[in-house]
Image: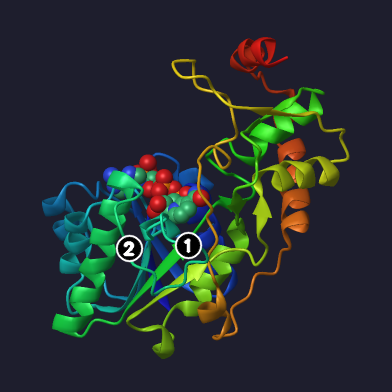
Amino acid sequence: MRTLVIGGTEFIGVHLVRALTRAGHEVAVFNRGRRNERLPAGVRTIVGDRKDHAAVRTTLAGERVDALVDVTYAPTTGEDVDAVLDALDGRLGHALFVSTCRVYDHALPIPYDEATPRSLYWGEYAKHKIAGEDTLLRRQRERGLPVTIVRPTHVYGPMNTRNNETFFFDRLLRGRPVLLPGDGRWLRQFGHVEDLADAMVALLGRREAFGQAYNVTGEETITQAGFVELIADVIKRPLDLVPATAPTGAPAVPFGQNLAYDCHAVHTTAKVRALGVRPAYTLAAGLAQTYDWYLHEGLDRRHADFTADDVFLSRAR
Ligand SMILES: NC(=O)c1ccc[n+]([C@@H]2O[C@H](COP(=O)([O-])OP(=O)(O)OC[C@H]3O[C@@H](n4cnc5c(N)ncnc54)[C@H](OP(=O)(O)O)[C@@H]3O)[C@@H](O)[C@H]2O)c1
């Protein structure tokens, strides 16, 4: 298949490009060209800024693609998604949009399936993702373009641009305590980036997936505290977990980004599993592999600033 990835040089995008290449697809990426040295050999690059809609139209004018994956959050609005679809109008076989489980109304009881009402619980981010999803669905309804929406949550793994699992590796390796928000009982789910990439590849060109949205994440559910305990277990380090709640007006408590919000985030993946798409990694195996990458990259020797932790710990103890 001739595939086009919008983005492709950061975290999820890189893993997607690798998975497409592994599966034997022809891959082109469209981005501003800042990190194109990360791309595997044989990937064609198209340089442009997706926010410049006139340039998107000109740059993509000669492209004919079987499948488009719109990964990047630039932040990407519905108009930005529309501009790419317009530029490929009549020359595109299937469009897949990377949304997020944060489109769901997290004030509702868990778990969230794909029919859970969407809301602006998660603010601007949810607003843009909902607009992107609706843009795709409108294309299919009005112009017959086959579209698919993928909703990941808490993606982890090598090359993560967010300081999530690395946040805990940094502290545990140095024997530092880990601050935990409240009692740490909110539920979370994590999906390995390679599983997400493989799921997207598996959905491309798949007729049953046309017009559908899919939650794509790991199959395990774990509390905030359980997640940190599992990481300590996987990397074989003792854990000193310090429950902490920020007093009003205090500086922000340095929690790992995936921990620091007060609601459950649990999503059913039965719909995508019904297509035979399942994660290969357990959470423990995925964390072990991510830790190997962290060590391999020498991130265990990087400078880490614990000043904010120390301010809070001196008050908490
Ligand atoms: N991480 C998670 O836990 C999680 C969970 C749910 C959903 N998601 C979604 O997954 C996606 C993350 O994708 P990602 O990890 O690949 O990183 P990303 O930060 O969304 O995308 C970065 C890529 O987009 C390109 N890019 C950025 N701005 C651009 C622009 N204006 N025009 C053209 N290209 C642009 C970058 O290359 P250049 O800088 O060279 O342009 C780079 O290739 C997002 O859509 C996010 O909402 C993530």
| Front one among 285 and 70 | 285
Instruction: Check the image and name the residue furthest to the left.
Output: 54
Q: Give residue 184's quadrant in the image.
A: top right
| Front one among 202 and 305 | 305
Q: Give residue 283's quadrant in the image.
A: bottom right
Q: Which mark is first along the chain, 1 or 2?
A: 1
> Residue drawn 50% across and 48% down?
263
Can residue 51 be seen at all in this image of the molecule?
A: yes
- Residue 137 in picture, x, y percent from top left: 24, 75
Q: State the CA–CA distance, disc 2 to disc 1.
A: 13 Å
Q: Is residue 99 above or below residue 242?
A: below
Q: Which mark is residue 269?
A: none
Q: Is residue 49 above or below residue 92?
A: above
- Residue 267 in picture, x, y percent from top left: 53, 65
Q: Which mark is residue 118?
A: 2
| Quadrant placement of the N terminus | bottom left
Q: 10 Å neighbourhood of mark 2: few (<14), some, or many (≥20)?
A: some
Q: How is the image coloured?
A: rainbow
- Residue 139 in picture, x, y percent from top left: 19, 76
- Residue 22 in picture, x, y percent from top left: 60, 69
> Residue drawn 22% across and 80% down?
140
> Residue drawn 54% across and 23% down?
246
Instruction: Check the image and name the residue furthest to the bottom.
Output: 207
Q: Is residue 210 above or below residue 70?
A: below
| Front one among 274 and 56 | 274
**Left or right: 112 as drawn, with respect to 28:** right
| Quadrant placement of the C terminus | top right
Please name the amino acid that badge 1 sits on. Answer: Pro
**Left or right: 208 as drawn, with respect to 20:** left
**Left or right: 118 as drawn, with respect to 290:** left
Please name the amino acid that badge 2 sits on. Answer: Arg
Q: From the image, tell me which residue sits under label 1.
A: 109
